[in-house]
Image: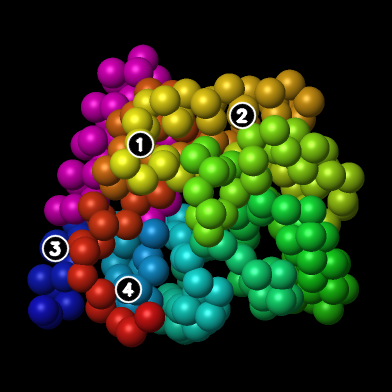
Amino acid sequence: MSEQARREELAASLAEVRGRLDRACRAAGRSPAEVELLAVTKNFPASDVVKLSELGLSSFAENREQEARNKVAEYAGLRPDGSARWHMVGQLQRNKARSVVRWADVVESVDSDRLAEALARATANALDAGDREHPLDVLVQVNLDEAVGRGGAPPAEVPRLAEMITRTSELRLRGVMAVAPLGGDPDMAFATLSEIAERVRVDHPEAVDVSAGMSGDLESAVAHGSTRVRVGTALLGGRRLISP
């Protein structure tokens, strides 16, 4: 596919996703300005990120640290004047903390004390070394179905983990994130997440972000208060353009 054809394809997909978001917000009695569109660019090249940024997007998400690190650097070379904001949304091992804090503006998948501590230490070192200018924004990932291997803190543990994060000066608690259970009812899952998010906000009013909803269930997430939807397939397509 030519560069122009790909640009047109992405523009059409973006218009369709934005239309879905607008309709979902209207149905929920909300303003579309309340919901951020986060483009999940895993397995797609930096050139697609450039095209999406030229189409008006500024927030991008990655699932794997090594792929993200390389892509962020490539994007910076392709568009040195760009202002992309990068999110880590995949499960993160503690030994990747030092690397991820050098490129990520936000880590949405904090699900344990040990990971939070590792990120805080890595952020402190990066700030001292001049590799970062600001503390790291983080979200607590909530496990809504207790599935092994999917990541996320159990709901009962979320308030305690949120409190632990706020005791560090290197991390800034911004809210919660979750993925709807596979094959489950997204309305029920996102209603539960909304209740958890509200409990967190009572103690931490700055933690206003609710990252929920993807290509297949964004309407349900918006109806239950999501402030950020993470869209990959509906925006970029289902095929892989680069090796994982």
Q: Nearer the viewer, mark 2 or mark 4?
A: 2
* Three-letter code, disc 3: Glu
Q: Amino acid at mark 1?
A: Gly
Q: Quadrant of residue 146?
A: top right
Rendered image quadrant of residue 65: bottom right
Mark 1 or 3: in front is: 1
Q: Position of residue 164 (x, y in %)?
A: 84, 44
Q: Amino acid at mark 4?
A: Phe
Q: Secondary structure at mark 1?
A: loop
Q: CA distance from mark 3 to mark 2?
A: 38 Å
Q: Main secondary structure of the magenta part?
A: helix
Of the numbered discs 4 and 3, the one sitting upstream in the chain is: 3
Nearer to us in this view, 4 or 169: 169
Q: Residues within 10 Å of mark 3 (few under 14, many from 20)?
A: few
Crowding at label 2, few (<14), some or many (≥20) Cα neighbours within 10 Å?
A: many
User: 10 Å neighbourhood of mark 4: few (<14), some, or many (≥20)?
Assistant: many
Q: Nearer the viewer, residue 133 or 201?
A: 201
Report the coloring of the rendering.
rainbow
* 37 on left or right of 125: left
Q: Amino acid at mark 2?
A: Ala
Q: Which residues are magenta?
A: 12-39
* Mark closest to the chain's N terminus, 1 or 3: 3
Element type at mark 3: helix
Mark on residue 184? 1
Give the percent coordinates (x, y) of residue 22: 28, 30
> For the image shown, how many numbered marks are present on the structure?
4
Query: Is residue 91 visible in the rendered structure shown here?
Result: yes
Looking at the figure, which quarter contains the N terminus?
bottom left
Nearer the observer: mark 3 or 2; the answer is 2
Which mark lies nearer to you, 4 or 1? 1
